[in-house]
Image (spheres, helix red, strand yellow):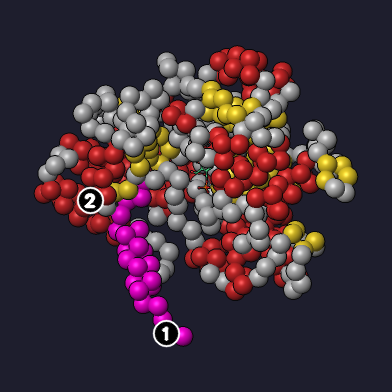
């Protein structure tokens, strides 16, 4: 077959973009060569509906071993008793949990989207907001951290069946113990979506959601540095609290309900090539070198927050506990929007994303802030000594937002810096 030069030229072009730029999108990372290799393998050819040892198709003896390896490694990484490694993405993992524990119209609590929550935690345009009844809890306006007292008040009033901890744009740790107390008071299940800080949690750098959270979901491609995908986990399996049944009778355990919610509930055949890549990345995440890496991610983020503060920017909640932070542009540049900053920085080969800040006066399409994170540049080998320079370059571009000469000069500096930091071999 003839090589599809059109597609492969575009892939090369994207590789060059990744190679030369400073990547600060908090939800992105660079996987290893062996993760890439597993993803591009012949496992993509295999249908394997079902679970290891219980498939709907023949010829699954090898993918059974692959999937079991992924399960065993992730159980070890998070000290989990049960895991489903099949969700195609984080949003799928969340949709599966909701399908398992909620009925249409049931109430659940999630962090307000404009305060850092995720679309799959109750946006009116996501199935979570279309099928169920989301109620939002918020941040305290003074601390810009989760207001747990208010959360309790809302839970007592609304009697949700599910409470979700976790966010897309929140730089502080979570008090899972406190949230479990609230959940107990109202008879709700507690779920943590650790999509962003999963790697830091896995290696003990943040509070662990187990044993407080009944169910945990995550993506595998952010701080965890695996292929794009999702997971559903439980620290300890428990009896199906709602007495859910199938035509064959009652389902005893929550693990069975969750397995069925992933498949056939919301998905078809699992992506065994991606599951193989997940297994590889989980093996990596258990290594000493990953521990060093994830500690550096956190150190780089702390340094970056301090550098922004030193340059007169407002960092939401005045700092970070994890890999990310939100910069509220209104303090230093009241006229400049997150959208403008995102766009101008792309021209300087620096990538980050516009983001609402708590109590934002602008819309999600313009925003008053940007979100920044250190997982990707840390994978490239960047340490604290370069972070000050990176912040300086960002500041220079924002200060000269319409000056093409300055933008061009910064781009050259960015490319020169990143020349010194390798990316996977193409
Ligand atoms: C907290 C949280 N949950 C879920 C997701 C969704 O993950 P995916 O894009 O893999 O569906 C994200 C993605 O950014 C996220 O931040």
Tell me if I can see residue 78 in this picture: no
Disc 1 residue: CB within 8 Å of ligand 1: no
Packing grade of label 2 (10 A; few <14, some 14-19, many >=20) is some
Extreme residue in the right direction? 249
- Which mark sits nearer the N-terminus, 2 or 1? 1
Residue 305 sits in quarter: top left
| Range of residues picked out in magenta | 1-24
Of 14 and 125, nearer the camera is 125
Residue 131: % across, % down: 61, 36
Q: How many marks?
A: 2
The overriding secondary structure of the stretch rendered in magenta is helix
- Mark 2 or 1: the one toward you: 1
Of 305 and 348, nearer the camera is 348
Provide the residue designation for mark 1. Answer: 2
**x 45%, y 35%: residue:** 169
Of 336 and 398, nearer the camera is 336
Q: Does residue 52 sit above or below 394 in this rendering?
A: below
**x 37%, y 40%: residue:** 372
Residue 47: % across, % down: 67, 68
From the viewer's perspective, tell me whether residue 262 is left or right of residue 17. Answer: right
Q: Does residue 165 sit above or below 380 in this rendering?
A: above
Provide the residue designation for mark 2. Answer: 347
């Amino acid at each position: 077959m003839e090589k599809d030069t059109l597609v492969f030229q575009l892939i090369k072009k994207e590789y060059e973009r990744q190679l030369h730029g400073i990547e600060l999108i908090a939800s992105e990372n660079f996987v290893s060569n062996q993760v890439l290799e597993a993803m591009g393998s012949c496992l993509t050819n295999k249908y394997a509906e079902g679970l290891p040892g219980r498939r709907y198709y023949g010829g699954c003896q090898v993918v059974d071993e692959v999937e079991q390896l992924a399960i065993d490694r992730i159980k070890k990484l998070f000290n989990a008793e049960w895991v489903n490694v099949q969700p195609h993405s984080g949003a799928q993992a969340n949709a599966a949990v909701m399908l398992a524990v909620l009925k249409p119209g049931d109430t659940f609590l999630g962090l307000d989207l404009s305060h850092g929550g995720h679309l799959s935690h109750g946006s009116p345009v996501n199935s979570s907001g279309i099928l169920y009844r989301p109620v939002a809890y918020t941040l305290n306006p003074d601390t810009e951290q989760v207001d747990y007292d208010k959360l309790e008040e809302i839970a007592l009033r609304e009697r949700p069946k599910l409470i979700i901890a976790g966010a897309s744009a929140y730089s502080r740790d979570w008090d899972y113990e406190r949230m479990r107390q609230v959940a107990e008071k109202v008879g709700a299940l507690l779920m943590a979506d650790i999509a962003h800080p999963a790697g830091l949690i896995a290696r003990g750098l943040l509070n662990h959601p187990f044993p407080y959270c009944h169910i945990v979901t995550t993506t595998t491609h952010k701080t965890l540095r695996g292929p794009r995908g999702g997971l559903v986990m439980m620290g300890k399996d428990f009896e199906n609290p709602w007495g859910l049944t199938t035509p064959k009778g009652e389902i005893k355990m929550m693990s069975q309900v969750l397995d069925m919610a992933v498949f056939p509930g919301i998905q078809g055949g699992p992506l065994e090539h991606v599951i193989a890549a997940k297994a590889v990345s989980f093996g990596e995440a258990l290594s000493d070198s990953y521990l060093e890496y994830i500690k550096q991610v956190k150190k780089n983020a702390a340094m970056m927050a301090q550098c922004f503060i030193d340059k007169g920017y407002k960092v939401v909640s005045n700092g970070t506990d994890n890999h990310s932070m939100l910069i509220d542009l209104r303090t230093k540049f009241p006229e400049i929007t997150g959208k403008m900053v995102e766009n101008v920085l792309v021209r300087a080969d620096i990538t980050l994303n516009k983001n609402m800040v708590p109590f934002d006066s602008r819309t999600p399409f313009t925003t008053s802030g940007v979100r920044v994170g250190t997982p990707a540049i840390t994978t490239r080998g960047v340490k604290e000594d370069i972070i000050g320079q990176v912040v300086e370059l960002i500041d220079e571009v924002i200060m000269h937002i319409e000056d093409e000469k300055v933008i061009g000069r910064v781009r050259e500096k960015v490319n020169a810096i990143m020349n010194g930091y390798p990316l996977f071999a193409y």
